Amino acid sequence: MSHRAPGADRLPALAAPGGELDRLVRDGVRTVGAGAVWAVGDAGGTLGGGSHGVLGQGPYARLVPGPDTLYDLASLTKIVALWPCAGVLWQSGRLPLDEPLGRWWPPSAGHPAEVLTVRQLLAHTAGLLPYTRFAQLYGREPAAIRAGVIAAPLHRAPGTAVEYTDRAAVLLTYLVEGLGGAPLDELAARWAWRPLGMADTRYGPLGPAETAHTAPTEYEEPLGAHLRGVVHDPSARLLGGVSGNAGAFATAHDLARLLAAVLAPPAQLPWGERWITESLREQTGGLTPARGLSWLCTPGTDPAEGTFVHYGFTGTGIWVSRRLGRWALLLTNKVHYDRNTQPLTDLRNAFRRAVFG
């Protein structure tokens, strides 16, 4: 399912080499500091793309980004891995959106999380504590982290506010893995990445060959080096690099395949039309910021317009509009340079306006 809108035929011209989008990103990376890969397309695939800048400082200053550069996706992992797996389980009837979690975890009697629903977790209205400093809260052992996340008190009453938290994705990871009967990395490869031909997408830690074309992220004092091929998110690192909140690496080439499938899901996908339609609508009951399921309604736009977005802390971003029948991606490793996000926010907003209006 894809939709064409007035002005849709202008997108190839915008995306042409040296065209408006290419100039916008070229000029934008000078302010952002980090290099960038961009692409836009429709249900048929990529209509145009390009890259500018370099991948880093010091030993990385001669490396240039491209469509086959692997990026630490950070929170885009929620879309690339966790969201499609939840969709498979939902479409098969194993993961109702509005059943309390206590249905699956009866031994958790008395835990606050047992009253929450999957819909609330995906829409970030569950009232969970917003921070995820698991090492300080629960220690460094995955079993202790799991027990701590499930038993954690609520921050506020469920359904009363939209509050983004990685904790919701970690909690949902445990549920998806239990119902799917395998770790999330295996489920994501089976249900999303292999069916879509996303051959470069995987969880880390990456091997030497993959690391050689991976964008570095932040400097890690204990390592005495920049993280590269190892997930930036410290909580995901404690969980072995595989989690629903962060941990996946992918290329622009692979993300283009996923975004095109959101517009026109192939018949062989175990998740697809019904799940996408359910996800890409406002799910927060008028609370702001408006969210779908995993996806965020693009800030500053009318949720009814149907343009959805997700960003990653490392500097990644994707957008999709089924109404307009187009998608876009802009990948950077901004966190490698610094945590000043305003220049990247300005570039993202300008890029989104150029593509979607």
Image (cartoon, rainbow, N blue to C red):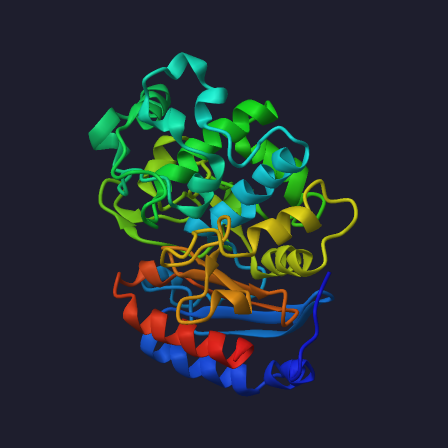
Counting the numbered discs, the total is: 0
Up/down of 315 relative to 95, above or below = below
**Res 33 visible:** no
Q: Residue furthest right?
A: 267
Instruction: Determine which quarter of the picture holds residue 17.
Output: bottom right
Q: Nearer the viewer, residue 213 or 84?
A: 84
| Residue at (46, 39) in percent of width and height | 244
Q: Residue furthest top?
A: 107
Q: Position of residue 223 (x, y in %)?
A: 27, 41
Q: Quadrant of the N terminus?
A: bottom right
Q: Position of residue 130 (x, y in %)?
A: 28, 43
Q: Is residue 211 left or right of residue 85?
A: left
| Residue at (33, 37) in percent of width and height | 235
Q: Is residue 239 left or right of residue 80?
A: left
Q: Residue furthest front?
A: 285
Q: Position of residue 294 (x, y in %)?
A: 48, 49
Up/down of 91 relative to 183, above or below = below
| Residue at (28, 27) in percent of width and height | 152
| Residue at (67, 69) in percent of width and height | 42
Q: Nearer the viewer, residue 340 or 147?
A: 147
Q: Position of residue 51 (x, y in %)?
A: 52, 73
**Res 305 visible:** yes
